[in-house]
Image (cartoon, grey):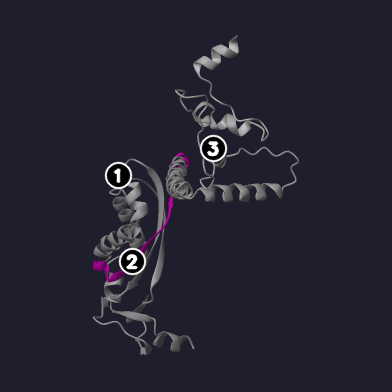
């Protein structure tokens, strides 16, 4: 059984066997499938061809604008040339991780913090290109690089929170001012329409009274618009004005009652009161005697 294992080997589909004969590597890897080897003559090194994941530990990096942050990432790589991966480097997994750590610190240092947070895809692409340029000599291809987390200092987090809060307040004030402007335009148009139609103000007043009357308040203070008093100023147009009559004999001037008595005073007189008559200067002196 031990002899069979030393002579025969089975290579899975996801692996390749790099064969060394008397210490010299064979040009082509073997597998997958069943393979025969000579004991103590051939040596087999198995290489995994599946995509492997390498975590990059958190790195303290100073950005271009002098902000200290901690960045960690993850690298996906795959062996495309098993022979070069074995003879080109001692441990291609460890070497790939170290190259990724060095490239991460170097590239992050060329970006400002805002650019790093806003354009993370560009940083990932540059990281992948830089790491792949170094690992290509070992027969390792970098499939993808992703920045997993960016840890900011607590002081910077508080400053960013204040900045975001101020930005929200600015937007809220702009929206409120825009609403006030639109409301003032609508109110101005409504006032113009009510001024053009005097009855609209009365209807609006009655509607407001009806809405207030539905409440449970026992005391109601309601200002009466001045427009409602305009109907009492001028008399109706369909009532004919009283003809003026003359007073006294010849040579006396005829004076209309409305010329001496104001309309407001005439409206306050009782219906049975006599109409005031204008007197001439002679009659006034006679009455004085």
In the rendered image, residue 98 lying in the magenta stretch gets the answer no
Dot 3 falls on a residue whose secondary structure is loop
Identify whether 248 is placed above or below 175: above
Image point 34% across, 72% down: which residue?
78
Q: Nearer the viewer, residue 184 or 174?
A: 184
What span is colored magenta in the figure?
A: 136-158
Number of numbered callouts drawn: 3
Answer with left or right where residue 192 lies relative to residue 225: left
> Earlier along the polypeptide chain: callout 3 or callout 2?
2
Pointer 3 residue: 233
Label 3 crowd (10 A; few <14 / some 14-19 / many >=20): few
Pointer 1 residue: 64
Question: Percent x, y for residue 61?
Answer: 36, 47
Answer with left or right where residue 117 lies relative to residue 248: left
Q: Nearer the viewer, residue 83 or 194?
A: 194
Write down the quadrant of residue 130 in the picture: bottom left
Image point 44% across, 89% down: which residue?
4
Q: Nearer the viewer, residue 232 or 228?
A: 232
Question: Percent x, y for residue 174?
Answer: 42, 45
Identify whether 33 is placed above or below 64: below
Pointer 2 residue: 92
């Amino acid at each position: 059984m031990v002899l069979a294992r030393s002579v025969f080997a089975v290579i899975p589909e996801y692996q390749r066997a790099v064969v060394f004969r008397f210490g010299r590597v064979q040009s082509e890897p073997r597998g997958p499938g069943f393979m025969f080897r000579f004991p103590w003559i051939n040596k087999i090194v198995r290489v995994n061809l599946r995509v492997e994941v390498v975590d990059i530990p958190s790195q303290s990096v100073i950005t271009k604008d002098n902000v200290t942050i901690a960045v960690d990432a993850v690298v996906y790589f795959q062996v495309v040339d098993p022979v070069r991966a074995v003879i080109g480097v001692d441990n291609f997994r460890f070497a790939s991780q170290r190259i990724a750590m060095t490239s991460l610190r170097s590239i992050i240092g060329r970006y400002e913090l805002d650019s790093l947070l806003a354009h993370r895809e560009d940083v990932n692409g540059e990281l992948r290109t830089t790491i792949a340029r170094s690992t290509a000599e070992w027969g390792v291809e970098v499939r993808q690089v992703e920045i997993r987390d960016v840890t900011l200092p607590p002081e910077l987090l508080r400053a960013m929170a204040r900045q975001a809060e101020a930005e929200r307040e600015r937007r809220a004030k702009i929206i409120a001012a825009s609403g006030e402007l639109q409301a003032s335009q609508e109110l101005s148009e409504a006032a113009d329409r009510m001024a053009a139609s005097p009855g609209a103000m009365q209807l609006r007043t009655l509607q407001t009274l009806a809405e207030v009357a539905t409440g449970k308040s026992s005391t109601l203070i309601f200002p009466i618009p001045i427009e409602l008093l305009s109907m009492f100023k001028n008399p109706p147009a369909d009532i004919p004005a009283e003809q003026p009559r003359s007073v006294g004999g010849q040579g006396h001037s005829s004076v209309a009652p409305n010329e001496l008595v104001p309309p407001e005073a005439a409206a306050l007189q009782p219906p049975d009161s006599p109409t005031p008559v204008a007197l001439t200067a002679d009659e006034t002196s006679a009455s004085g005697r």
